[in-house]
Image (cartoon, helix red, strand yellow):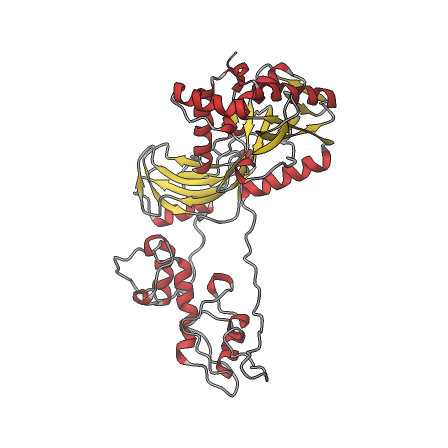
Amino acid sequence: MSRIRAFTMPKWGIEMTEGTIAEWMVKEGDSFKRGDMLCLIETAKITNEVEAEYDATVRKIVVGGGSDAEPVGALLAVFDDGSNSDADIEAFVAGFQPAEGGLAQGTSKAKAEPAPAPAAAAPAAEKTRIKIETNRPISPEALRLAEEEGVDISGIEGSGRGGRITHQDVVKALRGAGSPALKGTVAVQEDDLKVFASPLARRIAALNGISLSGVTGTGARGRISKADVLALMPKPTSGNVGTPEFVPGANRPEVVPFDRIRKVVAQRLTQAKQELPHFYLRMSASADAMLEMRKTANLVLGCKASVNDWIVKASAMALVRHPDVNVQVHGQEIHRFPHADVSIAVASPKGLVTPVVRQANLMRIDQLAAEARRLIDKAQGKGLSMEDMEGGTFSVSNLGMFGIENFDAIINPPQGAILAVGAAQRQPVETATGGITFETRISFTLSVDHRAIDGAAGAQFLQTLKDLIEKPEGLFA
């Protein structure tokens, strides 16, 4: 018997305790090479692409994609070279034990010797199994159930990837074939017995002469419910001639559960808002000089630095000049940093993430723009790693591109402050001679943790930020 390998929930970072299989890129029976992508694993903060560390064959997927979270060390799948029997694989799964403390690695070092097989059932209890020969894609569990129950799979429409027949598809076919006749004074249409519906929904449909064929159910796994049938019944008409009565239908919500990232964001921001003594400092700055220099710099440097890139650069340089703001708070300690690692808030498909532009104060504007673009692209493609998001000393959150004039951002602990950036707006201002002119102004709100940063320190930081934006040649000093 060749070596059997266990693929378990890996541990990335000290804080990770569980993860979720977002999607499998391989299926049972597939062979893969080292470096091939196996699956996407979603943690509390990120979604990671997991690559194979060796050549092998997928013998059994224990935890399917989209299932509930599994603890670190949990068995996710079983790999080998394809030479072991199904009984060997099942025995390995039954006898698998996670590494001590639950910290199993990507491949288990456990011996492949199978655990003692359970006692065989008495021959009288065994079902007659019909061998099914087919070239249709079907999971091993689904094929085994179809053979044991004698289900004709030719009429089953697979709901898996590429039309693959799943275990649930076979179970659904069994339910349709074995639906009992309903008691009562009415007969249920024969076609309706093949539809996945609740008994009450079938009875109401039969009493009102409604066919369930073609009805899309809103219940679990597409089951037709009582509400679905009632929605098909004719509505009573009003006594007013020519004016039909308006009868509002059911206003059913679309229930979208929190994904892993949104759960963590909600937990951390709630904790931050409840426990951190926030106070807010507001200031606006003229952006005309910065916008003009941005056009010139983009041409000279051959880059596409955004307004937000310039604000991140100005914030980083102001932080170095005011180290009392460039801090993290850890318990009863304040950690000051010599360089500015600026977290930028990015709206990704999985929710708000904050990748870090490291030592932004030392970068040229074209270097900063390239690094910010790289991080944003990774966030949009679900490719951010733990290293991309850890260790920021300050955050910048910009909603100006959405036309938001100003807002108050919540501090991202353990950082001591976050800068909220509003939209650039043309506003009238009084000139030195008493006249009126228009200029482009941007509003800033600095949210500050009062435990670590005093009001004067925050105000001085904002004053330096304003000077750098209004006199942007200082950004190249």
Kindly identify the residue that appears in the image at 57 percent across and 25 percent down.
392
Extreme bottom residue here? 185
Between residue 188 and residue 179, name the one nearer to us. Answer: 188
Q: Give residue 123's position: percent from left, percent from top.
A: 39, 64
Between residue 315 and residue 96, name the one nearer to us. Answer: 315
Residue 361 shows in this picture: yes
Q: Give residue 22's position: percent from left, percent from top.
A: 46, 44
Count of marks placed on residues: 0
Left or right of 444 on screen, residue 97: left
Residue 423 shows in this picture: no
Figure quadrant of residue 153:
bottom left
Q: Give residue 161's position: percent from left, percent from top.
A: 36, 52
Kindly identify the residue that appears in the image at 48 percent across and 81 percent down.
206
Q: Is residue 367 above or below residue 22?
A: above
Work out which quarter of the rendered image holds the N terminus and state it.
top left
Kindly identify the residue that appears in the image at 56 percent across and 69 percent down.
249
Q: Is residue 464 above or below residue 439?
A: above
Figure quadrant of residue 166:
bottom left
Q: Give residue 175's position: percent from left, percent from top.
A: 44, 69
